[in-house]
Image (spheres, grey):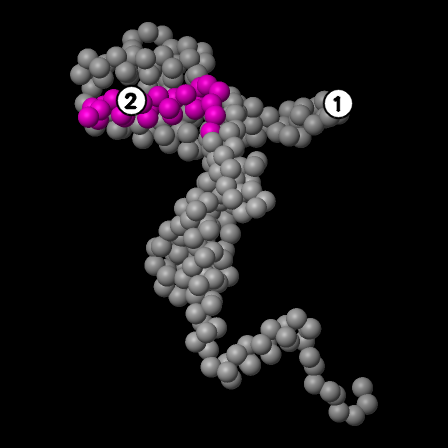
Amino acid sequence: MVPLSKELLDELLGLVDRLTMQHRSTVSVETEDGGEAKVTIKHEPLLDQLRAAIWSEKRNRPGAGGIPSERNVIDSDALEQYEKISRQITRLYRETTSAAPFASPTQNLRSWFVAFKMQVELQKVSGEIVHEKLRKVGSMVAAIETKLNPPTILEITAPCPRCGVTYGNDKDGVYRRAVVIESRVAEYKSLDNSRARCVACGAVWVHGRGMRQLRWEIDQVEETRHADANPFEQIIEQDARLGSAIGEVRPKSEGPS
């Protein structure tokens, strides 16, 4: 069995690599025939992406260099986040080594990991500390990815197929549709980073398969509802759908208009 610290170190190294090195990810995309295919995407280091995001698109667009006010436009939120993460990395480095930190957060983070890994292998660091550093570095990755690729929030109009509730209050107290999807659709339109949750019963569907499962469950509930409806209800429902399709029908006015 692989020691717990080795597994944690491998996971920690993966996070450090995403922050400081070019890396690749594989996502599942739906093909035209309804199947699935794997697509590999290459990413620049997250720290480099965040630093590049500091300068706004307005500054980098063609012809923007002629106006001083446009040359100086920056994304202050990206700058603040970059400086905050740089300070966190510097603190990690200083906690582990007495050497002077580098000017680059990338160099500091990679040097920190080498020194930290050595301490773990010499059993100078407990598993709890490794967990703590893993959470800290993981929060850096999550913060940058949220900034670069913020989630799109979608509300499903159908009731939750698990509990049947249509509306509910989310964790912030906002009254909304019960089933809410948080999606980060990549450039290849993959649903790998999608997550749906019912704010009423807490049911969760994740990634592409989860999204397809949610759609299937909603369809099953609709089919069952139509099968159980009595003829009078079906007539009323069909009439309502017809009315909404052709527009509002107003009563005939009496007398001259």
Q: Which mark is residue 9?
A: 2
Q: Which residue is drawn at 52% across and 23% down?
A: 44
Q: Residue at x 47, y 68 (%)?
A: 223
- How many numbered marks are there? 2
Q: Does residue 32 appear left or right of residue 105 in this picture? A: right
Residue 187, quarter of picture: top right
Q: Which mark is residue 66?
A: 1
Q: In this view, does 191 lie above or below 179?
A: above
Compute the Cα span from label 2 to label 1: 49 Å
Mark 2, other Cα within 10 Å: few <14 / some 14–19 / many ≥20? many
Residue 117 sits inside the magenta stretch: no
Where does the image place residue 48, in percent across and percent down from the top left? 51, 21
From the image, give the main secondary structure of the stretch colored magenta: helix
Where does the image place residue 138, in percent across and percent down from the top left? 36, 30
Quarter of the picture holding the N terminus? top left
Q: Residue at x 43, y 33 (%)?
A: 143
Where does the image place residue 183, in percent across and percent down from the top left? 49, 44
Q: Does residue 70 appear left or right of residue 195 in this picture? A: right
Q: Does residue 234 appear left or right of residue 202 in this picture? A: right
Name the amino acid type tagged 1: Gly
| Magenta highlight range | 1-25
Q: Which of marks 2 and 1 is nearer the N terminus?
A: 2
User: Helix, strand or loop at disc 2?
Assistant: helix
